[in-house]
Image (cartoon, rainbow, N blue to C red):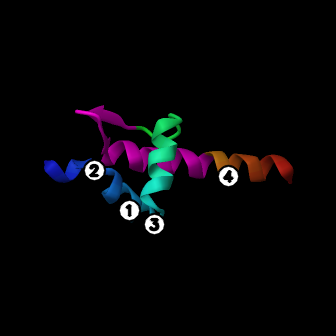
């Protein structure tokens, strides 16, 4: 169960980006997350869906340009 909730560090490792990048995305509301005691937490399923949504958006943009 605890693996279903990720920290900024775990999300950064998962996405292969820096912790600063994840923090910035979270602060701007561009990645799904929530705060617990002032610390960001992320549901793995929400991150996976966010990735899929990003793929669909990118595919849609490419299709529009052709």
Q: Which residue is mark 3?
A: 16
Sequence order check: which comes first, mark 3 or mark 4? 3
Q: CA distance from mark 3 to mark 4?
A: 21 Å
Sequence order check: which comes first, mark 1 or mark 4? 1
Q: Is residue 38 left or right of residue 23?
A: left
Q: Camera-side residue: 10 or 38?
A: 38
| Image x and y of residue 34, in percent | 33, 34
The disc placed on residue 6 is 2
Asked whether disc 1 touches disc 2, contact meaning CB atoms under 8 Å apart, the reply is: yes
Residue density around tag 3, few if under 14, some if 14–19, many if 20 or more, within 10 Å: few
Asked whether disc 1 touches disc 3, contact meaning CB atoms under 8 Å apart, the reply is: yes
Asked whether disc 2 touches disc 3, contact meaning CB atoms under 8 Å apart, the reply is: no
The disc placed on residue 59 is 4
Sequence order check: which comes first, mark 1 or mark 2? 2
| Image x and y of residue 41, in percent | 30, 42
Q: Residue furthest left?
A: 1
Q: Which residues are magenta?
A: 33-56
* Secondary structure type for disc 3: loop
Q: Is residue 17 magenta?
A: no
Q: Is residue 54 magenta?
A: yes
């Amino acid at each position: 169960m605890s693996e279903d909730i990720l920290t900024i560090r775990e999300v950064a490792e998962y996405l292969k980006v820096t912790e600063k990048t994840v923090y910035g995305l979270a602060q701007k509301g561009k990645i799904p997350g929530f705060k617990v005691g002032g610390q960001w937490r992320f549901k793995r399923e929400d991150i996976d869906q966010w990735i899929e949504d990003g793929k669909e958006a990118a595919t849609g943009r490419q299709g529009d340009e052709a």
